Image (spheres, rainbow, N blue to C red):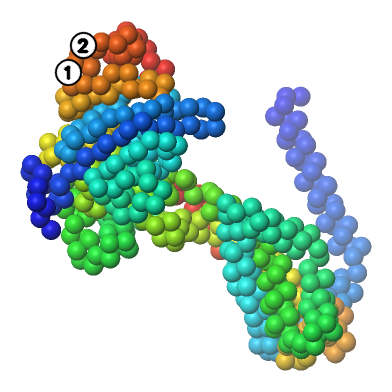
Amino acid sequence: MTTRERARLSLGIQAGLFVVAVAVLAVVMDWQAIATSFFDVERIGPMFPDILVVGLKNTLAYTAVGFLLGLLGGLVLALMKLSSFPVYRWLATGYIEFFRGIPAILVFLALGFGVSIAFGWNLDSLQIAGVSLGLVGAAYIAETLRAGLQAVPKGQIEAARALGMPAWRAMVTIQIPQAVRIVLPPLTNEAILLTKDSSLIFVVGLTAGAAELTKFGRDGINIYQAGLTPLVAAGVCYLLITVPLSILARRMERRTSTKK
Amino acid sequence: MAESTPAPDAAVVGEQAPAGVVISELHKAYGRNEVLKGISMTVDPGEVVCLVGASGSGKSTLLRCVNRLEEPDAGTITVADHVASDPDVDLDAMRREIGMVFQQFNLFPHLSVLENCTITPRRVLKQSKADADAEAMAQLQRVGLEELADRRPDQLSGGQQQRVAIARALTMRPRLMLFDEPTSALDPETVGDVLAIMRQLAEAGMTMIVVTHEMTFAREVADRVVFMDQGHVVEAGPAAQVIGNPQQPRTQDFLRRVLDPTHVDLDD
């Protein structure tokens, strides 16, 4: 048998196994049970439009506030990490290690319950979710931004300084715009991660108006008697946010890589 | 804006009088590696000086000390009326009078050719867009690239990029130009265009310090050639003399290796 014949045979066997596996699944699986447990679309009709206008909206709001705070905090931390003053670097490193190293749900619990117990502040769910995601996101975003700033060639800053630009001006007009192009794809990935982490707000309990997608899904299980179909609906709504984001990230990645 | 002592052909260079440079007892080390071991030299206003020598001889470091991209350890540098080596000197004001051209061009890739030339005049000198654009187009015309004003740097050849880099430096109306191996990263067929513009600039009366391996350029354009080796100025004098009739053995040896066509240099 030649190598090519052997390769063709192996491919044939794999295809055959796949067909058999699908056939067995089709026969063995209880499709009726799957349909009623996960895809009982008719019964969850009343979830709409609230799951979109309230749930999707709140998920987007929590994520957007968290991402913006994370971006802001991340930028400060990145500049601290690049500082020539060692105390700044240590502080930034400590922060990043801490918030990257603990589960995000602990931060939600700390803000949702700890802060009100300790200081008597009553934070609303947008504040809890936004600040929690911001605190955690900043740690990840800081590393992304630092890498992006460092990826701008040194000669760029030298050229700007040699023309007579002050250091801050060279950073604002030359270094940061170039770094932004480099970090846009990884930043989009951070946004996707934060979108999913926004579901953690469920641990503090949410009012009807503040419910986001996961809350809608969980509550729907009790309300509609449609098995887990409400969770599937919530999942689809997450994908409505995250899939366009990753397509966007891939596009930008392609654009920046062809530029080089 | 007319200066009291206009340069020869001042209208071509700009209204600024060319500046001179005085370097005295300059020392610079990276850790224990001493790169400059007490360099003293003078460049008169309007003079063209070529720094030549093997790589590692300290010529690029010397050039980068003039506009303080490198911090000298000891010694003094004066550029026009700025004491460049003074820690309290207004670096940005001084650098605006010193144009610099790099081996790797260092054009800003996120800006068009025109924007590369206008960003500093607009953001730092606060020129209006119309004024900055007009000046930039005039300088791009001088280097023969006004038609590429809307392109991005990555759409240009290396030689074109370097010519834009020269135009960009000239839009700041410098009184002194530093060239750090401006043709070393270029394809051989584009070297001539860049050297032609540098020659034109020299003839217009610009003060120029040029680190280069182009001996023909040095011989024909430079007023003086300074040969450096291991952090010392070994030999300095009129170009024809240093290149045509070198006195020091180290200069002779270097020139033999650079000029001897049967010798294959590692860089080639």
Q: Is tag 1's residue or tag 2's residue first in the polypeptide sequence?
A: 1
Amino acid type at circle 2 is: Asn
What crowding class fits label 1: few (fewer than 14 Cα within 10 Å), some (14-19), or many (20 or more)? some
What residue is drawn where x is 57% and y is 59%?
A79
Residue B105, given in percent of the width and then of the height, sits at 35, 41
- Report helix, strand or loop for mark 2: loop
Q: How much space separates mark 1 and mark 2, taking CA atoms?
A: 7 Å
Using the image as rendered, state which of residue A204 and residue B231 is in the foreground: B231
In the shown orientation, is residue B214 left or right of residue A237? left
Q: Is residue A218 visible?
A: no
- Chain bearing mark 2: B
Quadrant position of residue A197: bottom right
Quadrant position of residue B177: top left
Looking at the figure, which quarter contains the N terminus of chain B? bottom left
Using the image as rendered, state which of residue A58 and residue B256 is in the foreground: B256
What residue is drawn where x is 20% and y is 13%?
B244
Provide the residue designation for mark 2.
B245
Residue A205, given in percent of the width and then of the height, sits at 82, 85
Provide the residue designation for mark 1.
B240
Amino acid type at circle 1 is: Ala
Q: Which mark is residue A23?
A: none
What residue is drawn where x is 66% and y is 74%?
A66
- Report helix, strand or loop for mark 1: helix
